[in-house]
């Protein structure tokens, strides 16, 4: 153990505590805080953010970090300590470049912008949110610009914050492959899927019963209620304070059975990642998931590859029917499976079927590139959004609430996040094919035994936290780095079989 590293620990502990406090305010703001609280609570968040920056960006930490980079010191560091130093260097580089007053101002603005977004979505008034979006965007452009090296585009900097293994070049190649392979497949499958009657999904489903069944699903997938809780929010999300306090939210819609069910499975996938990180790593800079791409791989794996499979529902479908007998008694399991996998052009990303979902991500990615690389007019952004939906999906939003305002991410300044969803879906497929090699996956699901599946992910991915990056983990688990071909293979095999396409 390095004595110099031990000198760093008090600063890491203080920054962790301040970050935890900020997270608690964010959780409260999105779940139970009164609507008018944000404007005033944001001052508290601003002060905490200022203190967080000071806890890391100071001469003492800088001196310790410089000393730890010496060869003699490096030789005394454990692998975990080296990983912490690597992660801390990234955080240090991000924060050191930003003037403290700007960092605080942005962190005060974001909670207010999110509340404005929430109301604007409810009222269907993009014009109310647009000034805040413009201000948030200006801050993120400025912050990324402070860190630009080698003539990179600022958007590239933000992408790397969420997934360091993918830049604009890699994403452009990935998304072009999806367009080439998935759009024709979607057209073929949609033609056959039109005959599937899914009207049962839009009947009335009692909200209290939805809460009860979703809690069952959450526990069935593996959520530990001794170390986590479920709340409600306008947009489902997962937050961890540490691996023994992981919080998820859901949203319930009376005339949409699938929405809450697959959201809770999705968020449980995120939660399992955080709960399974080793105790020795939690509450350190490497005590969270290694990237949003790998994080979304866990949620998309459970939501889609597991949660939309017939084997998953075989042991529990009767329980679902029992919860809503008036609506589902005449819906067979085979009918239900085709229903939850029915592809259709839809406006809402979070409600999208698995096959059309990547098109929603491409639309957001291309829109963000326009915002950063072409200085797109914020006031006219709904027009850009609507045109892209018409081009890719053949439909146009009837209003801003189902269009440009549907996602919360931009209100928090989370530009560059959206590609992680598609990356995650591809990684999930790569992990899936590896699991098929090492375990009788379908049999386990039919038996209602998800334990071996969770254990595989825990031992292969989760426990390492952020000590290894996405490609390092994939290389160790599957024998190769990221390979999108598995995603194409998975979608083709699944949908061609489900809809008898030759």
Image (tube, rainbow, N blue to C red):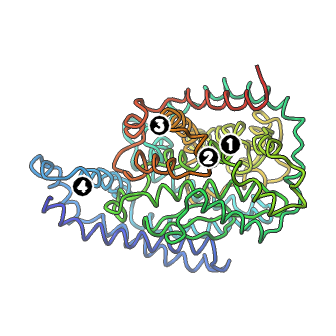
Residue designated by label 2: 445
Residue designated by label 1: 309
Q: Judge whether 425 appears above or below 101 on screen.
A: above
Give me the C-alpha separation between circle 3 and circle 2: 33 Å
Q: Judge whether 93 appears above or below 42 on screen.
A: above
Q: Which element is circle 1 on? A: loop
Give me the C-alpha separation between circle 3 and circle 1: 29 Å
- Judge left or right: residue 249 versus residue 151: right
Give me the C-alpha separation between circle 3 and circle 4: 25 Å
- The image position of residue 147, as x and y in percent, is 39, 48
* Residue contact at pointers 4 and 2, CB within 8 angstroms: no
Residue designated by label 3: 166
- Judge left or right: residue 259 versus residue 143: right
**Residue 435, label in figure:** none
First in sequence: mark 1 or mark 4? 4
* Residue contact at pointers 3 and 1, CB within 8 angstroms: no
* Residue contact at pointers 2 and 1, CB within 8 angstroms: yes
């Amino acid at each position: 153990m390095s004595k110099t590293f031990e000198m760093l620990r008090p600063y890491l502990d203080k920054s962790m505590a301040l970050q935890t406090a900020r997270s608690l305010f964010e959780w409260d703001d999105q779940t139970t805080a009164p609507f008018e609280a944000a404007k005033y609570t944001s001052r508290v968040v601003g002060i905490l953010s200022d203190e967080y920056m000071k806890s890391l960006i100071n001469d003492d930490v800088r001196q310790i970090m410089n000393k730890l980079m010496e060869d003699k010191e490096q030789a005394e560091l454990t692998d975990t300590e080296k990983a912490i130093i690597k992660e801390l260097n990234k955080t240090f580089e991000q924060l050191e470049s930003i003037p403290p007053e700007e960092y605080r101002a942005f962190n005060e603005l974001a909670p207010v912008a999110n509340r404005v977004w929430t109301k604007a979505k409810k009222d269907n008034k993009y014009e109310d949110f647009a000034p805040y979006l413009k201000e948030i965007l200006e801050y993120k452009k400025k912050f990324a610009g402070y860190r630009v090296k080698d003539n990179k585009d600022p958007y590239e900097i933000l992408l790397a914050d969420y997934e360091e293994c993918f830049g604009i070049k890699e994403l452009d190649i990935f998304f072009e492959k999806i367009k080439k392979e998935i759009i024709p497949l979607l057209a073929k499958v949609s033609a056959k899927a039109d005959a599937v009657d899914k009207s049962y999904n839009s009947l009335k489903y009692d909200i209290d019963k939805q809460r009860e069944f979703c809690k069952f699903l959450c526990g069935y997938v593996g959520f530990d209620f001794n170390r986590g809780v479920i709340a409600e929010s306008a947009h489902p999300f997962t937050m961890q304070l540490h691996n023994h306090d992981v919080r998820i939210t859901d949203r319930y819609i009376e005339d949409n059975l699938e929405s809450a069910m697959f959201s809770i499975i999705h968020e449980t996938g995120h939660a399992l990642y955080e709960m399974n990180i080793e105790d020795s790593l939690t509450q350190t800079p490497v005590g969270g998931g290694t990237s949003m791409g790998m994080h979304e791989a866990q949620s998309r794996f459970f939501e889609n590859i597991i949660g939309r499979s017939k084997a998953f529902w075989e042991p529990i479908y009767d329980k679902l029917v029992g919860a809503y007998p008036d609506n589902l008694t005449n819906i067979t399991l085979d009918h239900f499976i085709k229903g939850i996998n029915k592809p259709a052009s839809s406006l809402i990303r979070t409600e999208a079927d698995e096959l059309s979902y990547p098109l929603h991500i491409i639309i957001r990615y291309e829109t963000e590139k326009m915002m950063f690389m072409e200085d797109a007019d914020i006031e006219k952004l709904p027009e850009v959004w609507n045109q892209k939906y018409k081009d890719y999906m053949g439909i146009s939003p009837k209003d801003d609430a189902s269009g440009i305002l549907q996602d919360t991410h931009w209100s928090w300044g989370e530009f560059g996040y959206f590609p992680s969803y598609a990356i995650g879906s591809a990684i999930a497929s790569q992990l899936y094919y590896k699991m098929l090699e090492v375990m009788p996956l379908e049999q386990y699901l039919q038996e209602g035994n998800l334990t071996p599946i969770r254990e595989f992910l825990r031992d292969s991915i989760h426990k390492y936290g952020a000590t290894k990056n996405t490609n390092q983990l994939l290389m160790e688990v599957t024998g190769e780095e990221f390979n999108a071909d598995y995603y194409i293979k998975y979608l083709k095999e699944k949908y061609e079989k489900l809809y008898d396409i030759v």
